[in-house]
């Protein structure tokens, strides 16, 4: 069972903000920082960067303060007897970097919504959202080699998938992050398990599949829209990833079924 006492996202404070609760709360406290902050950890005051998470168990001493022009975070205080919280391997009272802060922030927004509105399945939804949040935090906690540039890498990955038609090169991507080509290739593969150029290819093929299924563009038009300058190159990469040619993909029974299920389709009445 989960019972939320208080929850807030985008909480913001001035540069003199200090949160000092020597006896701790009666409940659990989970913070996600959006700015750098100083935490008391093992008797020492240590500065941590933005996009860290820290979990406090009930009755645990709490101390943190701003160390920049402002302090901002998402936070939740809650009671629970769920084992995914009470037996979590996350070390309480010690901040750690979050691999995907935007994803976790969105979960906080959803939790706030569910907490405010008295929906029929409110308790179940809150429990499921908190489980997802803890899963995402565990992914970060167990990922020992998180790069300080992960936020920048995540933004780069999102930009690649939002704009696959751009003429991406490793040099152009490295320049955006102001790092060397070799370093970008190493940390991108380490962070996402795929090279940055393979991600470019995947983003282009994903877009091509969407156009093939839901639009009436010609193959030649799709080649250009997906950022290819050579039709042969596009066909080769599409076949390698999907196992089909673009024409076969467009005509396959599964894709025809998907077209019929397209929610954007307008039927003539």
Image (spheres, rainbow, N blue to C red):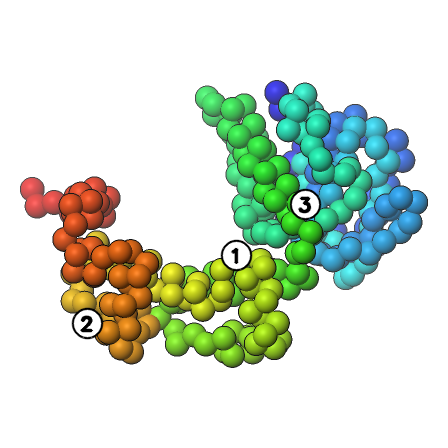
User: Badge 3: few (under 14), some or many (20 or more) residues near its Cα, within 10 Å?
Assistant: many
Please tell me whether mark 2 sits on a helix, a strand or a loop.
Answer: helix
Q: Is residue 62 above or below residue 243?
A: above
Q: Nearer the viewer, residue 62 or 46?
A: 46
User: Badge 2: few (under 14), some or many (20 or more) residues near its Cα, within 10 Å?
Assistant: few
Q: Quadrant of the C terminus?
A: top left
The residue to which callout 2 is attached is 220
Which residue is rendered at x = 18% and y = 43% of the image? 257
Residue extending furthest toward the right: 43
Q: What is the x, y in percent for residue 179?
A: 62, 75
Please tell me whether mark 1 sits on a helix, a strand or a loop.
Answer: loop
Looking at the image, residue 256 sits to the left or right of residue 237; the answer is left
Which residue is rendered at x = 86% and y = 45% of the image? 41
Q: Is residue 225 visible?
A: no
Q: Earlier in the sequence, mark 1 or mark 2?
A: 1
Q: Is residue 79 above or below residue 167?
A: above
Which residue is rendered at x = 66% and y = 24% of the image? 83
Badge number at residue 193: 1
User: Badge 1: few (under 14), some or many (20 or more) residues near its Cα, within 10 Å?
Assistant: few
Q: Is residue 37 above or below residue 115?
A: below
Q: What is the x, y in percent for residue 192?
A: 53, 57
């Amino acid at each position: 069972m989960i019972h939320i006492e208080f929850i807030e996202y985008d909480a913001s404070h001035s540069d003199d903000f200090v949160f000092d609760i020597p006896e701790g709360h009666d409940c659990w406290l989970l913070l996600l920082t959006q700015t750098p902050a100083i935490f008391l950890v093992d008797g020492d005051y240590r500065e941590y960067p933005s996009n860290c998470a820290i979990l406090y168990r009930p009755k645990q001493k709490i101390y943190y303060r701003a160390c920049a022009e402002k302090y901002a975070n998402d936070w939740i205080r809650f009671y629970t007897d769920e084992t995914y919280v009470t037996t979590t391997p996350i070390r309480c009272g010690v901040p750690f970097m979050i691999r995907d802060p935007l994803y976790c922030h969105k979960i906080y927004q959803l939790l706030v919504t569910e907490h405010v509105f008295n929906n029929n399945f409110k308790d179940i939804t809150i429990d499921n959202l908190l489980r997802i949040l803890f899963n995402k935090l565990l992914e970060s906690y167990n990922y020992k080699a998180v790069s300080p540039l992960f936020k920048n890498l995540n933004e780069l990955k999102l930009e690649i998938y939002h704009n696959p038609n751009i003429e991406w090169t490793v040099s152009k991507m490295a320049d955006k992050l102001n790092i060397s080509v070799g370093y970008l290739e190493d940390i991108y593969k380490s962070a996402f398990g795929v090279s940055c150029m393979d991600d470019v290819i995947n983003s282009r093929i994903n877009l091509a599949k969407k156009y093939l299924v839901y639009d009436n563009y010609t193959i030649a038009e799709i080649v250009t829209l997906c950022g290819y300058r050579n039709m042969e190159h596009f066909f080769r990469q599409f076949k390698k990833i999907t196992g089909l040619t673009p024409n076969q993909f467009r005509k396959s029974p599964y894709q025809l079924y998907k077209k019929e299920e397209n929610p954007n389709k307008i039927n003539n009445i």
